[in-house]
Image (spheres, rainbow, N blue to C red):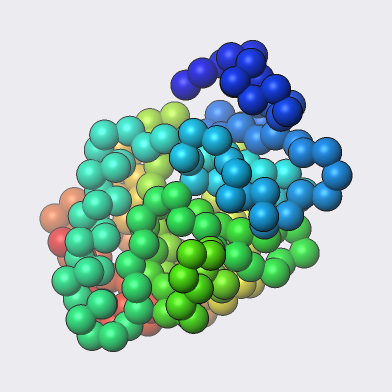
Amino acid sequence: MDSPAELDEQEDNLAWIWTVPWSYCYPIKGVVTIEDLYHVPEDRGAELIDGKIEVLSYMEGLPGLVAGEIMFSLMQYAEPCGLGVVFGGKIGYVVGLPHRKSFSPRASLYNGPNTGMKFPSRAPMFAAEIRNSWEYGLEVDAHREQKRADYFAAGTLVVWDVDLLGADVVKVYRASDPTTPTVYRRGDTAEAEPAVPGCPFR
């Protein structure tokens, strides 16, 4: 990843600052809106939080592979069953929370209106957040807990926290019980009820 100084040289109109280990953000003069997300450089996923655009880090190899496998399972089951449309990373979901205006999960299922060449206009039914090797520790966990609360407040039914380095590989959080996950380990068949009913994830 380029340093903030290098990024500043590439985008003179943006003031780049590091914020958290898994992302960086930049302030824009004036009020930041969803329209500014259409101009995020480097073709990355980004989220509008607390008046700033937080640009997400790239995925490492294994997290990227797992994101693809989750999408493949959803495409095989959810789309043919008419449950929604499957999106990968870099998608931007527009929401109307007081402090958060968008989400960009690593893999997701959406059943809202077709917005064509604009961002989907509501939160996904199902979202998968997959950790890179540096996304661990108390700060990361607190950030993820807040993000899950935001997902549920925006209408998401199920959020996965995927940890490829730990024993508890998939933690399934549900809006109906947001603080008590169902845990799946290697060799288990995970699920995303009630967002994706009857769909097994192996």
Identity of the residue drawn at 40% across and 51% down: 89
Relative to 184, say whether 131 is above or below.
above
- Number of numbered discs present? 0
Residue 121: quadrant of the picture: bottom right
Residue 35: quadrant of the picture: bottom right
Relative to 122, say whether 107 is above or below.
above
Q: Name the image quarter holding the C terminus.
A: bottom left
| In this rendering, position of residue 118 left or right of residue 131 | right
Identity of the residue drawn at 52% across and 57% down: 92
* Residue 123: x %, y % from top left: 54, 70
Looking at the image, can residue 164 be seen?
Answer: no
* Residue 59: x %, y % from top left: 37, 37
| In this rendering, position of residue 28 left or right of residue 156 | right
Q: Which of 187 and 123 is in front in this view?
A: 123
Relative to 22, say whether 35 is above or below.
below
| In this rendering, position of residue 98 left or right of residue 9 | right
Relative to 69, say whether 54 is above or below.
above
Identity of the residue drawn at 36% across and 62% down: 87
Identity of the residue drawn at 26% across and 34% down: 61
* Residue 175: x %, y % from top left: 52, 75
Query: Residue reaching furthest front?
Result: 117
* Residue 159: x %, y % from top left: 44, 64
